[in-house]
Image (tube, rainbow, N blue to C red):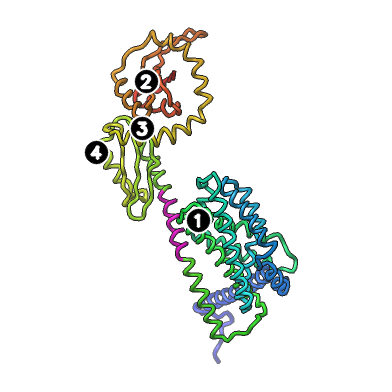
């Protein structure tokens, strides 16, 4: 009889098999937990985002139909709103422009087009398109008449902002339109529609188009009208999408083949409208990136010991031939230094960009005149306004300082060269003097030697920058500058 051991040895292969089974069981259990969590999260989000229970389909249709027609009160409200917006654009008043957008009834026929296509209401579609055409004609003619007679003919920033539509305007119109139709379809109405009218900005583009028509500037007219067209198309498209998703009852039944054709036409129309804005938006982004790269390049590479950058605002972006143009004053850069600067351009994302360096040596009459116009009229005049009080105080000090400083004048070998350089920037410069002033402290009796510059003339609107420039040229850590 075979004896069976009471404590048989465990087969070594059995333990790994048990561990493998446990791991497989754990993975299956974890998968079930994750699947359950995903389903619960989906159900929760669907419950949170579900709007079907709050929809007032019939009320939404009736409300949109009432706002389509541009006759009587709506026509006059639109005319007055157009005048408001035109005045706001003309005077660069953002508050007036916003007020005009709140008053304007332009959203009615645009939303009406989207609803009509969504529910196959062809009479409503014709009525919406007709009234939108009437509204556009009233708006453009009214604003053109205003801008034709206004004495303020210069285009302000609010006008210029409506002449170059981009893909970002498409996004604004799309999400604004979605917010508008979702809010408009609720049983309980809210104040979302005025906000949509402001965000999508239908009025200002039409007024800007009127400005282009009234002043004969066709780029303004075309750019602004394209912006209005983008807003109208994508607000209507957003309305169409929401109406279809909410399954609004259709007025007329159409066979599936015709429905498919309509969807294809709408998609093609939206893409055709979208393409130019994508290109323009890409250019805007490229210009912004170029500007940032130029600023970084100049900040990190133009701190010269003997030269000072006096103008770097002439840079411009072009897809094929971008240019960075800077003007230097002081000791001229050597050709090796300029080549080294050009070799660094690719490091800053500026490959293919031309670097033009203008220096004070060798300025001809044409360049000098250009600098005077750009610097004196632009930068220096702006800085003068900020330092006007400082300039007034100088007159009181000149009488006391001139007598004392005259005793200690001495000629510096760099004075004639600096005088020539300053004369390039400041046509009204009369004289330039440099000497070391001996100054005694009345309290301590300590005597200091302070390098001092005396400048006579007018037009020195930026004392701090000029002082920094002179410190570099004279190789002085401290310097006092006196104007008279």
- The reply to whether dot 1 and dot 3 touch (C-beta < 8 Å) is no
Numbered mark located on residue 213 in the image: 1
Lateral position of residue 98 relative to residue 55, left or right:
left
Q: In this figure, which residue is indicated by the disc labeled 2?
A: 430
- From where the camera sits, is residue 9 visible? no
- The reply to whether dot 2 and dot 3 touch (C-beta < 8 Å) is no
Q: Quadrant of residue 473?
A: top left
- The reply to whether dot 4 and dot 2 touch (C-beta < 8 Å) is no
Q: Residue at x 40, y 37 (%)?
A: 374
Q: CA distance from mark 1 to mark 2?
A: 50 Å
Q: CA distance from mark 4 to mark 2?
A: 33 Å
Of callouts 1 and 2, which one flags the residue occurring earlier in the amino acid sequence? 1
Quadrant (top left/top right/bottom left/bottom right) for the C terminus: top left
Q: CA distance from mark 2 to mark 3?
A: 22 Å
Q: Which residues are magenta?
A: 275-290
Furthest residue toward left:
335
**Above or below: residue 133 compared with residue 287:** below
Percent across and percent down for residue 14 are 52, 79
Q: Quadrant of residue 41?
A: bottom right
Residue 56 lies in magenta, yes or no?
no
Q: Quadrant of residue 2?
A: bottom right
Q: Residue at x 53, y 78 (%)?
A: 263
Asked which secondary structure carries label 3, the reply is: strand
Q: In this figure, which residue is indicated by the disc labeled 4?
A: 335
Residue 287 lies in magenta, yes or no?
yes
Q: Nearer the viewer, mark 1 or mark 4?
A: 1
């Amino acid at each position: 009889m075979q004896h069976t051991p009471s404590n048989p040895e465990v087969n070594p292969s059995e333990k790994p098999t048990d561990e493998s089974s446990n791991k497989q069981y754990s993975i299956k259990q974890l998968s079930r937990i994750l699947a359950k969590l995903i389903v619960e999260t989906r159900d929760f989000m669907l419950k949170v985002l579900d709007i079907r229970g709050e929809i007032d389909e019939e009320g939404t249709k009736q409300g949109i139909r009432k706002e389509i027609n541009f006759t009587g009160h709506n026509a006059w409200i639109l005319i007055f709103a157009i005048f408001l917006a035109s005045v706001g654009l003309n005077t660069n008043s953002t508050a007036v422009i916003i007020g005009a957008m709140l008053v304007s009834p332009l959203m009615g026929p645009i939303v009406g087009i989207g609803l009509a296509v969504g529910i196959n209401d062809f009479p409503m579609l014709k009525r919406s398109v007709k009234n939108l055409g009437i509204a556009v004609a009233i708006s453009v003619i009214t604003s053109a008449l205003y801008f034709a007679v206004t004495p303020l003919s210069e285009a302000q920033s609010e006008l210029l902002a409506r002449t170059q539509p981009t893909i970002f305007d498409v996004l604004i119109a799309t999400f604004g339109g979605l917010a508008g139709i979702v809010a408009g379809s609720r049983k309980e109405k809210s104040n979302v529609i005025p906000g949509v009218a402001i965000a999508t900005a239908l009025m200002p583009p039409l007024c800007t188009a009127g400005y282009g028509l009234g002043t004969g500037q066709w780029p303004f007219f075309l750019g602004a009208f394209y912006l209005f067209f983008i807003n109208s198309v994508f607000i209507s498209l957003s309305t169409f999408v929401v109406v279809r998703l909410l399954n609004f009852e259709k007025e007329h039944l159409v066979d599936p083949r015709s429905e498919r054709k309509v969807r294809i036409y709408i998609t093609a129309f939206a893409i055709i409208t979208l393409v130019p804005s994508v290109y323009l938006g890409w250019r805007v982004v490229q210009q912004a990136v170029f500007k940032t790269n130029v600023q970084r390049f100049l900040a990190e590479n133009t701190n010269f010991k003997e030269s000072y950058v006096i103008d770097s605002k002439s840079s411009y972006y072009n897809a094929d031939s971008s240019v960075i143009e800077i003007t230097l004053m002081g000791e001229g850069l050597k050709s090796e230094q300029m080549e080294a600067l050009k070799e660094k351009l690719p490091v800053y994302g500026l490959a293919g960009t031309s670097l033009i360096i203008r220096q004070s040596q060798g300025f001809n009459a044409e360049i000098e005149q250009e600098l005077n116009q750009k610097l004196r009229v632009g930068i220096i005049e702006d800085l003068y306004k900020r330092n006007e009080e400082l300039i007034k105080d100088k007159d009181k000090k000149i009488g006391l300082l001139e007598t004392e400083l005259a005793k200690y004048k001495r000629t510096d070998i760099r004075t004639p060269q600096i005088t020539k350089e300053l004369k390039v920037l400041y046509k009204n410069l009369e004289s330039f003097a440099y000497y070391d002033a001996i100054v005694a402290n009345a309290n301590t009796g300590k005597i200091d030697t302070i390098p001092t510059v005396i400048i006579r003339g007018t037009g020195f609107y930026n004392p701090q920058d000029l002082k920094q420039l002179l410190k570099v040229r004279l190789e002085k850590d401290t310097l006092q500058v006196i104007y008279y």
